[in-house]
Image (cartoon, rainbow, N blue to C red):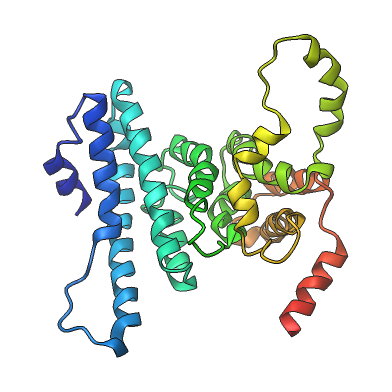
């Protein structure tokens, strides 16, 4: 369904930047405008209708990724930028769809399942035909777009560690040696650096270089600038609602450990497991008291 829509709008062949931007925005906004064909509306069925609406939008999202993966290798490098822009708009609209559902677990899980689908998911580790560059680009924009969406104060807090799960799964199971080195600094480090500043393994080295930086015209981002890129994620995560921001960092690390600790039979590669273990250790590890807190919350 997505390919005919894309071709009818002219995005496939558009080359003018302003036209590309408008069409990319219009295409992504379709996600939020889709409504299934329903007969009659009543108050008792309002929740079911909202669920059907969001599921129909997710079908469209799945069609989009199926089309992108099939056509990706045929996109010439001169037109690649406009497709990167389309992906950014698409991720943003997808997050807004999840937020509109108030992060309904069924809607969120369906969306994440689409992303890791073995045949058509952009973050799958099982399909050798899926371009690895696609996952790398999504990693580069994921945190930025989530932070933008959570900037709306009317949006409910988001389950951030859950939204990172497709990348965590790819991180532990990929056969590509470069993928972990792309995902860790793009997805996890920005959040951890802001949530757990005292655990930042690069902090000591940064302090040693601080004097030299003052004497130069270095344009390296300050701690405030780094935090600003994820400030909404920190403040509007379900992990930090009514708690300190460090809780989000600990939850992200625990999620990484849980995924890396799964057996080889579930696809986890030992080389990736060791990388994740080392990364979590560098950031202070997962303390037992954190696990005790989770058990207490489950009991309540």
Q: Is 132 rendered above or below residue 103?
A: above
Can you say which quadrant of the picture contains the N terminus?
A: bottom left
Can you say which quadrant of the picture contains the C terminus?
A: bottom right
Q: Residue at x 52, y 37 (%)?
A: 140
Q: Residue at x 82, y 13 (%)?
A: 212
Q: At which x and y percent is residue 203?
A: 82, 33
Left or right placement of residue 288 versus residue 123 in this view: right
Evaluate whether residue 244 shows in this view: yes
Could you say which is closer to the camera, residue 246 or residue 5? Answer: 246
Q: Farthest residue in the front direction?
A: 153
Q: Farthest residue in the top direction?
A: 216
Left or right placement of residue 23 versus residue 265 in this view: left
Q: Is 38 rendered above or below residue 189?
A: below
Left or right placement of residue 149 versus residue 73 in this view: right
Give the number of marks.
0
Q: Is 129 rendered above or below residue 35?
A: above
Left or right placement of residue 196 versus residue 181 in this view: right
Q: At which x and y percent is residue 161?
A: 62, 58
Q: At which x and y percent is residue 34?
A: 24, 62
Evaluate whether residue 118 shows in this view: no
Q: At which x and y percent is residue 91?
A: 41, 48
Q: Residue at x 46, y 68 (%)?
A: 102
Q: Farthest residue in the bottom direction?
A: 44
User: On the image, which quarter does residue 287 sit in?
Assistant: bottom right
User: On the image, which quarter does residue 56 sit in?
Assistant: bottom left
Q: Residue at x 37, y 54 (%)?
A: 119
């Amino acid at each position: 369904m997505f390919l005919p829509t894309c071709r009818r709008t002219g995005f496939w062949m558009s080359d003018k930047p302003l036209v590309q931007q408008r069409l990319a925005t219009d295409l992504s906004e379709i996600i939020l405008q889709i409504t299934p064909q329903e007969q009659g509306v009543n108050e008792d069925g309002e929740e079911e209708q909202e669920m059907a609406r969001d599921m129909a939008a997710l079908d469209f999202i799945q069609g989009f990724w199926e089309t992108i993966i099939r056509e990706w290798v045929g996109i010439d490098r001169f037109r690649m930028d406009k497709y990167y822009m389309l992906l950014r708009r698409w991720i943003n609209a997808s997050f807004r769809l999840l937020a509109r559902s108030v992060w309904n677990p069924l809607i969120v899980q369906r969306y994440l399942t689409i992303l890791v689908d073995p045949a058509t998911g952009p973050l799958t580790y099982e399909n050798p035909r899926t371009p690895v560059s696609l996952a790398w680009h999504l990693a580069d924009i994921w945190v930025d777009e989530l932070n933008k969406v959570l900037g709306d104060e009317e949006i409910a807090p988001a389950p951030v560690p859950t939204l990172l799960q497709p990348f965590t799964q790819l991180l532990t199971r990929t056969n590509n040696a470069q993928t972990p080195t792309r995902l860790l600094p793009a997805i996890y480090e920005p959040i951890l650096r802001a949530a757990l500043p005292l655990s930042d393994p690069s902090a000591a080295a940064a302090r040693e270089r601080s004097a030299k930086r003052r004497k130069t015209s270095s344009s390296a981002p300050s701690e405030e600038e780094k935090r600003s890129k994820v400030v909404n994620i920190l403040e509007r995560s379900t992990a930090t609602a009514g708690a300190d921001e460090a809780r989000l960092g600990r939850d992200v690390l625990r999620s990484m450990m849980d995924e890396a600790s799964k057996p080889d039979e579930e696809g986890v590669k030992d080389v990736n497991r060791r990388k994740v273990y080392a990364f979590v250790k560098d950031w202070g590890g997962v303390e037992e008291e954190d696990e005790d807190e989770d058990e207490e919350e489950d009991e309540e």
